[in-house]
Amino acid sequence: MTDRPLWSYRDIAAHIKVQPDTVRSYRKHGLLPPPDHVEAGKPYWYADTIRAWVASRPGNRGRGNG
């Protein structure tokens, strides 16, 4: 097992500056990668998984990391 932190819908939403419900909608419509871990029925993703997904999303140009 690894000590890498897992991100919830809320963490992903904060990272991409949207509401958690938007992230849930992305998953419902198959736009979010599959979760890296599921605990008690709740999905979680590694930060690296989400960063790679964000980098591959269309229209992400101009959305620098700060």
Image: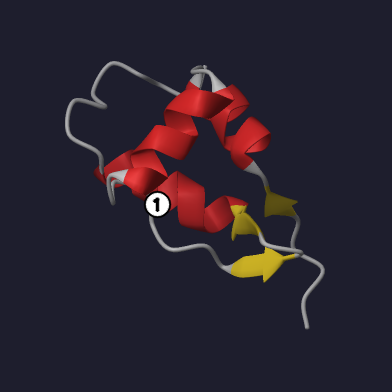
Q: In the rendered structure, which amino acid carries the disc numbered 1?
A: Ala
Q: Quadrant of residue 40?
A: bottom right
Q: Position of residue 27 (x, y in %)?
A: 39, 46
Question: Which element carries disc 1, helix, strand or loop?
Answer: helix
Q: Is residue 4 left or right of residue 36?
A: right
**Quadrant showing the N terminus:** bottom right
- Residue placed under numbered mark 1 in the picture: 52
**Mark 1 surroundings: few (<14), some (14-19) or many (≥20) residues within 10 A:** few
Q: How is the image coloured?
A: secondary structure
Seen at 61% across and 24% down, the residue is 14
Q: Nearer the viewer, residue 31 or 15?
A: 31
Q: Position of residue 44 (x, y in %)?
A: 63, 56
Q: Position of residue 60 (x, y in %)?
A: 26, 27
Q: Is residue 62 left or right of residue 46?
A: left
Q: Is residue 2 left or right of residue 48?
A: right
Seen at 77% across and 76% down, the residue is 2
Image height of 21 relative to 3, above or below: above
